[in-house]
Structure formats: structure tokens, C-alpha cells
Amino acid sequence: MASSTTFTKRSWRSNWRKWCTYTTMAGFFLAGGVEYSVILPTMWDYLQSMHGKEWLYGLSLSAFSISNLVTGPIYGVLFDRTHSTKLIILFANLFEIGGNFMYFAATSKYMILGSRFVVGVGAGGGAVIFGELALITTKKERTTVFSIFLMIRQIGMIIGPACNLFLRVMNFKLGPFTMDKFTSPGAFMMLVWIVLEFMFLLLFFKLPRMSQSEDEKARDDVAEANTQQRQEQEVKAKGRQRQPPVTKETAGCNSSSNMELGGDKQLSISNSYKTQSTRDMFARSTTDMPGSSLASNTRNRLEKTPSESSPLLLKKSSSPSLNAAKEGVVHAAPEDTQPRQVKERVSWLCSKFMREEIIVLLMVLFITIYDQTVLETQLVPVVESLLHWTEEYTSIFYSVAGVEIVISFLTVALLSKKIGDRWLVLLGLLMESFGYFWLLGTVGNATADTPWVFWKLVIGSIPAIFGLPFFIAGASLYSKLLPNSVQGFGQGLRRSVGSLAAIIGPLWVGSTVSFGNYYLLYGVPSGLLVATALMVLITLPRLKNPT
């Protein structure tokens, strides 16, 4: 009875910690979505009030993605080395708080630009969240979990415009600072990130990690065995090269001492080879990545205490030539150990990331973010030119699109339990392609006098928007194909690719929307979608969920 009660309390505590941790991570994505839709609608007017030009507005939009591109992999490497998710996020949130304070207290247009760059440094911590999710979820449930968390970010983007309803009416002094419709979004988001900082400090717990699958372990074991065999051969070869040549004097001495040693020379040399091999094997077994610091420390510790590791070798080797041979074998550590360790680490990382399926999935991610930013950026100039919409109608369209994306995320979460990730990616590519080719064919040469132009835009936008969340299956499959030891760096690299697409998309719209027609605007994304679909089809056999 007592054991049952103890088990119940332990289970309740485990569930409570899991619920708190998931809620805190969800708050991170919710705050990111709210920030996007609270800051951006008023940033252009904010810059204009300080005599900012159009190029500065574009640069301020890109500054967030540029810093995110750089810091994502850095956070990922820190996560892989330390697995201190809580400390890294607490550190990253300080940049979110500081950047939003800069936006709130800005005294020049360049301070606004700097604030968006600083906020992007903090947003790079999202790579750590995804790395943590990859380690605490099973591969079967990962697509659903990723979909839910990104859906929460989208919900934040829907909540943001509602927050602007009360932020835009503020107009008062707060000490030396002015609180108005331009500065209040920065102050509001600063408070949100402060609350989130305390949530991570008090409610975030380290959950148990899921172990690697058997096929991943088998692949790593094969690679480790090959490296081990190669290093053993190098050590033996260098040991033989360092043995002194046999002369008449040493031959005579050896022949006279053979009666006393009774063949102990061969035993000593053999033991020295085994000792060196054992040291290498033991040091390599402490980690799954070549050249790790733990393996190096273990090897150094063993080499510093030869008497403990091989007492027989020291006691029985009394001949000078035998001692020389012993020293040549036991201390035959390669002189270029550090460069070789770095080379092995780089080679190991390349073997994990320079694979056909990984590159294709990164391309899928790029085209996803690129298409999304093109759709978001082109909407305002296109509807103003063709439909003469005001800001009110545009905001309504954005809100409806946000609801559609939430419904699509829920659909992906349900379908992922019955359909494989690769088929969800193909389905998303199909819907995206239909939407963009429809816009290319019906709106490419449209004018304000074109009949039914509104419905043509709607028919093309619905599948293009609805298909975007389906690509989250590609992000989930990407994490499943990577070993657990590089999940942080992998998610950082994924965010960097997404940030690069988020920079290129708006630049493409800005350079093509004023051409007089929209063939080039919609044509290039359509061509990229076709190329990506062909890459996915060719690589389809490799895009299987590891079991």
C-alpha cells in the first residue's frame, strides 16, 4: 500500500513537471507570434516619425532574420555540448527584453534598427527549444508535437492585432519615456518577455531524454568500429617504427637475458600493444562523437598512470633495449592528435549533414519560408493596386488567413498519426504548387479592371496558405534523421536556412512587384516549387521515418 502511494506521488510529480515545461515552451512560441504582429504594423510609421527612409525599413525587417541566422547554430552547439536548455533560454530572453526596451526608448531611427537586431539574437534560442523537443519526444509523436507548438505561434500572430487595439490608444508620459502607439508595443513585449523569463526560471524542468533508435546506434557503432580499427593500426605501425634496431651487442645481451626473462620481452611488448589499444577503446567508448573532450581527458589520464594500467610491463622489463621498445610503444601517441581530432569531428559532422535526404529537407524548409514571406509581403501592394483596399480590409484578410493556418496545423496534427512525414510534405508541395500556378495564370497580367480578380486572388491564396503547415512534417523528419548528439546544431542550422529565406522573400517582392505585371513575382516561386517537388520525389526512398 505504501509503495503504491509512493508510485502515485512520483507519477503525479512527473506529470506536473512535464505539463509545466511544455506550457513554458509554448509560452516562448506564443510570445514570438504576438511580437511579430504587434511590432511590425506600426514600425513603418515609427520610422517615418524619425525621418526614416524605405531602405531603412527593409533593413530593419531583415535585421531580425540576419541575427537569427547567425545565432541559431551557435545556440545549437551550446545545447549539444551542455544540454542546459534552461540556462541558454534564460540568457537568450535577456536579449528579447533588452531589444524591446531599446524599441520602447528609441531616440533615433538607428536605435530602432539596432533593437530589431538584438531581438533577433534572442529569438535564435528557438533552435534550443526544438532541440529539446526532439530529445524528449518519440519519433512517432514528434510531428504532432512540432505542429502544435508552431500552431501556438500562429495563434500568437492572431492575438497580436487584438493587443494593438488597446496599445494604439495610449498617450502619456512614463518618467522620461513617452508611451504612445509607436513605443507602447515595445514596452508591452518587454513585460511579456520578463514574465516568460520568470516562467522559465521557476516552471521549466529537465525531462527524461528518449534513447536513440537501434538503427542509429548500429550506424554509429559501425562508424566507431572503423575509426577504432584504423587508429589501432596507426598506433601499432608507429610503435614498430620507434623500436631501436637490433645490433650485435643488443643481440648478445638479449640472448644472455633470455634465460632469465623466459620470453617476457615478447609478453611485455604484446601487453604494451594491448594496453594502448585498451586505452583507445575505453576513451572512445565515453562518447559517440570522435575527438570529444571526454575521450581526450580519459586517454590523457590513462597515459599519465602507466604503472596502474600495466604493472606487469614495468616490473619485468629490466633490459635497456626492452625499456626503449616499451617507451616507444606505450608513449606512441600521435604528435598531431589535436588536428586529427578536429578533422575527425568535421568529417563526422559532414557525414551526418552532407546527405541527400538532409539537403532535400533543408531545401523544403527554404521554399516553405520563402513562399510564406512572399505571400505576406506581396499582399499589401497587390490588393492596393488591383482592389484599392485600405488597411482595414487588409487586416481582415490577414486575420482570416491566420485562422486558416491554425485549422491547417490541426489537420496536420491529426493526419500525422496515419500518414508518413514524406507524404505530408508531398501533399503540401502539391497544394502550394496549385496555388502559385493559379496566381501565375490568372493574376499574372491582371489589372484593376480585370473581372473577378478578387475571387482569382482568393482561390489561389487558399491552397497556398493552407499548404504551408504541411511542411512541418519535413522539419519533424529532419530531426528524426539526425542523431541525438547533434540535434541542437541541426535545429540551429534549420533556423538559419529559414532566416535566409525570410530575408530573400521580401527582397524578391520589393524588386518585382512594380514591373507592371506579376509574372516574375509568382513565376520564380512556382519554378522553385517544381524543382523542390522533383528533388523530394527522387529522394523519396531515403525519406523514411527511422524505426
Image: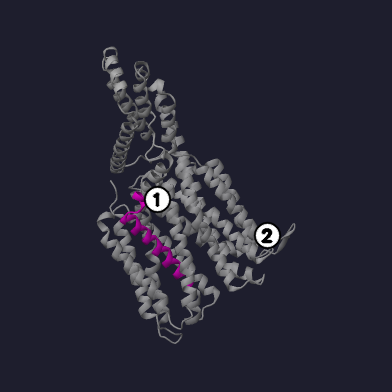
Asked whether disc 2 touches disc 1, contact meaning CB atoms under 8 Å apart, the reply is no
Q: Which amino acid does label 1 sit on?
A: Val
Q: Residue 547 carries which label?
A: none
Residue 132 at x, y percent in the picture: 44, 45
State the extent of the magenta-drawn residues as a range. Answer: 350-377
Q: Give SS at disc 1.
A: helix
> Of label 2 and label 1, which has the lower sequence position?
2
Q: How crowded is mark 2: few (under 14 residues within 10 Å), some or many (20 or more)?
A: many
Q: Is residue 159 visible?
A: no
Which residue corresponds to mark 2?
105
Figure check: 2 above or below 408: above
Which residue corresponds to mark 1?
145
Q: Is residue 386 left or right of residue 470?
A: right
Q: In this view, does 267 lie to the left or right of 155?
A: left
Which residue is found at the position 36% from the left and 35% from the top?
284
Which residue is found at the position 34% from the left and 28% from the top?
244
Q: Which of 123 and 380 is in front in this view?
A: 123
Q: Which amino acid does label 2 sit on?
A: Ala
Q: Which of 273 and 415 is in front in this view?
A: 273
Residue 323, image quadrant: top left
Residue 236 at x, y percent in the picture: 31, 33
